[in-house]
Image: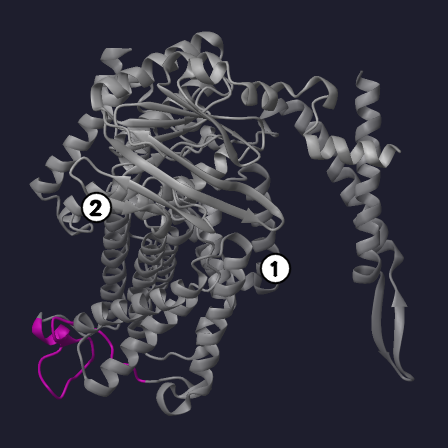
């Protein structure tokens, strides 16, 4: 029995090593060098051997570990395993703890300007992830062009604030509304599509918006973008050293001027926006609208047979998700002070989607962790620039191997009969 | 068509035909279903039973024909002109499916609340009142949960209320689908093979459930079924389809004795179970 197992594992490892050697041959085996006669080809056969050897031993080790840990490695979780009847009290406590940490973060001893700035960036992605979660996690509509709504929000704020001098707090709902309208606009043509087809069309939509931003020079500034976007104010008090119009933040509160004020303010602003998004989603999941989204994800035909209008339900999901992207976009614009189409490329959509999928579709806390992992870690390891994408890919592969349904995939019911059921059973 | 006096005619299908390419799936079918009655549609496989259901519930649009549904208050609905979800919401024709279609990842109770979507959505003022947690919405939700609880008790699923619908055993899933349909307060309940895959004991329980539904709510039930123990014991009226056309229509006893029905199910001895036109074709080819 063991001999047989060992043989299968050896064969398995040999196949893996062969594939690795095939890949390593062009990638590591050949090297172009500059010589006196021009370019010439160098061969590095030992490297190919090392790669194949490493894969061989690695594969063998994984096989042994898998045997050692038994079924824990091969756990594939089905739909009903994800479902947990327990209301997740531990998770709720954990959520509150996270909120508490987020609230005091700027005042922790090790916190500095850089950390708070990075945390702000992570929170933007948490908010975007939560917003996309409405469309992908709840309604089950795969959206690859979510960044378009983020861009619309950012440009809406930049243009409204710069052209008409409207304040941030008035622009925020306007930008959300505009993004939501575009969500409906995108929703209409794609209503009949599902899965892959929907993904392709939304991908196209994201690119269309980016190309428009790039080419509509008179309005959007084309590839140069929009600069000196109005910065946020604290109830009308600007965060600058001096202001010609009135007192500034530090003057009003009698503090010495520090650029840190604005960074902290932005951090709390995005924290508030993200928490608002979270509360909204937690509440709407318990309302008929949210349940209809989830029902639509589970079975559209059954929804129709129960009198749910799938068109309206999908449009509502698109619009709501887009609205939150619009809010996040406004915040992004006011934080950066400068926006250009480059910030809204497809890779942004991919990262947001990765945050949602890796976090566990529909899981709010999972998205926070995924955002920390995918956005936070690369920021901290900027020194390892070259290996960032490698680590990114490796993290994705590992999560998909061990947690194919996301880091924290579980769903507890939005309404419970609870005690009544226990009494009856 | 002779006029029935009592009870009131609730569904009237007239000259319904639908064609898929070269196949005439339903051919000039007319029948009626009555209030407080259980009407069974039976027939061999491929007779067009489910197609008729799909026409009634708007999933298919028939090429020819009229489907008229009459509510107790006298309002008429022409189902062939309505969208599928409007048929469920306004005309209140609610169906179940041959291959169970539950919201598998959601709890049993949530399944029943989704069925009351339209009413709850109105009560939540399209989420505004619900978002604010206004008492009017909370009251509506309480009523909805009470209704769900009522049907969970009827279908003996109350102990599983907070479990995932997809994790229930097969028979319970069938019952849940019926409970979900009842939560939508149908005027006409269409059940597509509710006894498929049930054991004899569960079939008996299903009979009792359907009779209880009729006794309690007076909902007219239209049912496709292969299980003759269900059809013969509880239906008031049986319609037999074969090749998309009606070949018999009457009480269970009358249908059981009908020549054409026996022919459709068992074939005639000389044709060896093949439809006559096909048997002739094969005979010609053999020569």
Which residue carries the number 2 mark?
B121
Dot 2 and dot 1 within a common chain = no
Say which of A263 and B16 sits in front: B16
Left or right: B140 in relation to A291:
left
Q: Quadrant of residue B154?
A: top left
Up the image or down, A14 lies above or below B37; here it is below
- The percent position of residue A245, horizontal first and vertical second, equals 10, 86
Residue, disc 1: A387
How many residues crowd around disc 2 within 10 Å: few (fewer than 14), some, or many (20 or more)?
many
Classify residue B201 as left or right of residue B11.
Answer: right
Q: In the figure, B256 relative to A265: above or below?
A: above
Kindly identify which chain the residue marked by label 1 belongs to: A
x and y percentages locating residue A138 in the rendered image: 38, 46
| Magenta-drawn stretch, dominant element (helix, strand or loop) | loop
Image quarter in which the C terminus of chain B is found: top right
Q: Nearer the viewer, mark 2 or mark 1?
A: 2
Q: Which residues are magenta?
A: A228-252
Label 2 marks which chain's residue? B
User: A327 or B37, which is in the foreground?
Assistant: B37
């Amino acid at each position: 029995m063991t001999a047989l197992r060992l043989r299968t594992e050896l064969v398995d490892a040999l196949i893996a090593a062969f594939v690795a050697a095939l890949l390593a041959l062009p990638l590591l085996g050949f090297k172009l060098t500059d010589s006196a006669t021009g370019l010439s080809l160098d061969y590095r056969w030992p490297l190919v051997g090392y790669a194949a050897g490493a894969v061989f031993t690695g594969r063998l080790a994984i096989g042994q570990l898998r045997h050692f840990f038994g079924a824990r490695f091969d756990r594939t979780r089905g739909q009903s395993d994800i479902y947990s009847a327990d209301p997740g009290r531990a998770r709720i406590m954990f959520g509150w703890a996270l909120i508490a940490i987020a609230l005091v973060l700027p005042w922790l001893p090790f916190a500095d300007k850089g950390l708070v700035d990075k945390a702000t960036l992570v929170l933007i992605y948490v908010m975007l992830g939560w917003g996309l979660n409405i469309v992908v996690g709840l309604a089950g509509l795969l959206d690859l062009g979510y960044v378009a709504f983020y861009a619309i929000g950012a440009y809406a704020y930049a243009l409204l604030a710069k052209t008409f001098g409207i304040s941030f707090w008035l622009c925020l709902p306007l930008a959300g509304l505009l993004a939501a309208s575009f969500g409906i606009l995108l929703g209409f043509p794609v209503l009949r599509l599902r899965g892959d087809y929907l993904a392709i069309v939304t991908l196209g939509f994201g690119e269309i918006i980016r190309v428009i931003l790039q080419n509509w020079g008179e309005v959007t500034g084309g590839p140069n973008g929009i600069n000196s976007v109005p910065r946020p104010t604290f109830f009308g008090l600007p965060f600058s050293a001096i202001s010609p119009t009135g007192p500034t933040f530090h003057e009003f509160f009698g503090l010495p001027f520090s650029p840190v004020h604005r960074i902290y303010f932005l951090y709390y602003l995005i924290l508030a926006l993200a928490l608002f998004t979270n509360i909204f989603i937690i509440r709407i999941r318990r309302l008929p609208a949210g349940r209809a989204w989830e029902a639509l994800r589970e079975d559209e035909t059954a929804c129709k047979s129960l009198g749910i209008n799938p068109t309206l339900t999908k449009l509502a999901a698109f619009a709501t998700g887009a609205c939150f992207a619009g809010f996040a976009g406004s915040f992004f614009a006011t934080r950066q002070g400068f926006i250009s189409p480059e910030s809204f490329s497809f890779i942004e959509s991919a990262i947001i989607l990765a945050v949602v999928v890796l976090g566990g579709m529909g899981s709010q806390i999972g998205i926070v962790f995924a955002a920390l992992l995918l956005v936070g870690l690369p920021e901290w390891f900027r020194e390892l620039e070259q290996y960032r994408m490698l680590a990114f890919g490796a993290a994705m592969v590992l999560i998909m191997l061990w947690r194919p349904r996301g880091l924290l995939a579980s769903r507890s019911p939005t309404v419970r009969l609870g005690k009544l059921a226990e009494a009856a059973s | 068509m002779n006029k029935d006096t009592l009870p009131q005619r609730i569904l009237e299908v007239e000259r319904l035909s639908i064609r898929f390419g070269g196949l005439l799936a339903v051919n000039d079918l007319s029948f009626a279903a009555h209030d407080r009655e259980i009407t069974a549609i039976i027939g061999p496989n491929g007779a067009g039973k489910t197609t008729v259901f799909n026409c009634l519930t708007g999933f298919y649009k028939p090429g020819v024909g009229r489907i008229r549904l009459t509510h107790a208050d006298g309002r008429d609905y022409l189902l062939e002109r309505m969208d599928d979800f409007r048929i469920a919401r306004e005309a209140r024709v609610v169906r179940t499916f041959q291959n169970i279609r539950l919201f598998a990842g959601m709890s049993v109770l949530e399944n029943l609340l989704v069925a009351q979507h339209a009413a709850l959505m109105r009560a939540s003022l399209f989420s505004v009142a619900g978002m604010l947690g206004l008492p009017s919405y909370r009251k509506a939700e309480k009523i909805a949960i009470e209704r769900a609880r009522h049907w969970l008790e009827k279908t003996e699923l109350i102990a599983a209320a907070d479990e995932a619908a997809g994790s229930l055993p097969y028979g319970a899933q069938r019952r849940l689908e019926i409970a979900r349909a009842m939560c939508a307060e149908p005027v006409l309940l269409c059940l597509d093979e509710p006894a498929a895959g049930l054991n004899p004991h569960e079939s008996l329980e299903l009979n009792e459930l359907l009779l209880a539904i009729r006794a309690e709510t007076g909902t007219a039930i239209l049912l496709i079924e292969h299980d003759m123990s269900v059809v013969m014991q509880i239906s008031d009226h049986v319609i037999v389809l074969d090749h998309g056309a009606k070949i018999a229509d009457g009480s269970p006893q009358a249908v059981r004795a009908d020549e054409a029905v026996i022919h459709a199910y068992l074939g005639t001895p000389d044709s060896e179970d093949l439809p006559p036109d096909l048997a002739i074709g094969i005979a010609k080819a053999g020569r």
